[in-house]
Image (cartoon, rainbow, N blue to C red):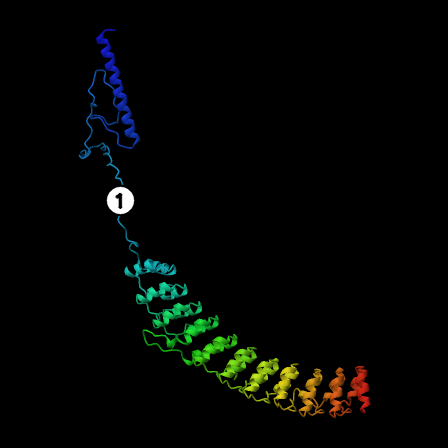
Amino acid sequence: MDLLSLLKSRLWTAIGAVGSVISAILLLWVFLGFPTPTFVGTSEPTTLTPEVTPAPATPAYTPVPAATPEPPTSTPAPPTPAPPTPAYTPVPAPTPRTPALSPNELTNTFFSAISGNDIAEIEHLISVGADVNSESNGVTPLYHAAMYGNLEATQALLDAGADPNFTTSDLLPLHAAARNDELEIARILIAAGADVDAGDFEGRTALDYASEDDHAEVVQLLTHADEIPVESNVDRFSRQHLNDAIWRAVSEGNTFIVKELIQAGANVNAVAGDGSTLLYFAVETGHSEVARELINAGADVNVASSDGWSPLYVAAANGDTSTVRELIRARADLDTRDTDGTTPLLISLFNMHPEPASELIASGADVNLASDAWGTPLFWAASNGFTDIVRDLIAAGADVDAKYDEDWAPLHIAAYLGHLAIVRELIAAGADVNTRDPGGATPLDLAQHREHAAIVRELKAYGGN
């Protein structure tokens, strides 16, 4: 091969190599997402190909300048190359937290923030127009915060001017706090001027709610509300509300709350429509500790119900010996009688409660007061087999021959029921062994009828026939 041929061959090899490099660069350009350059006079992107004849090292095309837009044509201009990607991503400018909301949307968003105790959102919404004294479904934002137990939200609303006494449905924030045992929320509401005496649509106050659910600390706070410095002058508890609350506390046997209400000024001698008192109610429901508190607070121990049932009568009827003792200590009338003439002593024996009967006898109750309906204490002691009580009654001067409704004497019932020891006590006390009922039957007749052999022998030994 001559020298000229060799040079031509090397030249073509070099041109081919340059073309390969340019093609590789273009492929990498496309792969990286940069716009494909367009040759002048064509509408389709293309790649460089080598000329048949030697060509210069630069491609024979003119790129469209990036800064100069194409004039409008029927064919869209090709996209311009993207600017270089910066080494960092700029932080976008902040957008408003809450876009423009309708009044309803603002209220709903406000209540949602209160439910979640989101203080930053609450304050933001107030700044853009949320009304701290608005209402949703009949409740205010402040009620909503108290209901959810959100102390911080409650304080934020108060700081923003929420009225603790504003309501559209008689549901007040203090009611919600009292019902849900939210002591600190109740405290800041009172300090902000909440009316502790205000009632709901049923007339129930915060104290009523707290008492119903046995929230002792809230009750204590409410009954001492006048000791809390407040930002406005608000009337404190009316005596009627205190009295309503103490009736409820007594019915539930809540001694602590009863004490708190008494100290707050509740009337311990409040009377119900049927004439019964708090003390009567406490005894009737078996709340002896509450009864003791009322007695110690000066409750009248002798006020009876319309049926003539005094607290002592009820305690004796129920077998409540400890309360009987407390009432006796407080100088209750031992011989008070109901409308049938029945005394505490008689009713305790009729109901088979010997312990309170023993207390009454020892304290000087009249052992011979009889009831037209129920007879004498001795008759029922003999009937129920209470030998010790029979002995105590006899020792206290009970008439051993007094008959129940002019029918049976104590010896009749003791012989009939087989109470030998009581038969002996009665005989020893001088009971008439041959006393007869309206049908002519003697104690011996009844003992023989019931086949009580030992009693038959005892009666015959003392002249029974």
Q: Is residue 368 left or right of residue 414?
A: left
Residue that label 1 marks: 90
Q: Residue 171, position in %: x, y?
A: 40, 69
Q: Residue 217, position in %: x, y?
A: 44, 71
Q: Nearer the viewer, residue 296 or 455?
A: 296
Q: Nearer the viewer, residue 452 or 221?
A: 221
The quarter holding residue 98 reads bottom left
Q: Residue 46, position in %: x, y?
A: 26, 25
Q: Residue 32, position in %: x, y?
A: 29, 32
- Relative to 335, is 264 above or below? above
Q: Nearer the viewer, residue 330 or 100?
A: 330
Q: Is residue 247 left or right of residue 133?
A: right
Residue density around tag 1, few if under 14, some if 14–19, many if 20 or more, within 10 Å: few
The quarter holding residue 306 reads bottom right
Split into 4 quadrants, where in the image is the C terminus? bottom right
- Relative to 91, is 39 above or below? above
Split into 4 quadrants, where in the image is the N terminus? top left
Query: Looking at the image, can residue 395 be seen?
Result: yes
The quarter holding residue 429 reads bottom right
- Relative to 210, is 451 above or below? below
Q: Is residue 51 left or right of residue 347?
A: left
Q: Residue furthest top?
A: 2
User: Number of numbered discs present?
Assistant: 1
- Residue at image position (26%, 21%) is 19
Q: Is residue 26 left or right of residue 423?
A: left
- Residue at image position (31%, 66%) is 159
Amino acid type assigned to the residue bearing label 1 in the image = Pro
Where disc 1 sits, the SS reads loop
Query: Looking at the image, can residue 140 be seen?
Result: no
- Residue at image position (48%, 72%) is 212
- Relative to 212, is 434 above or below? below
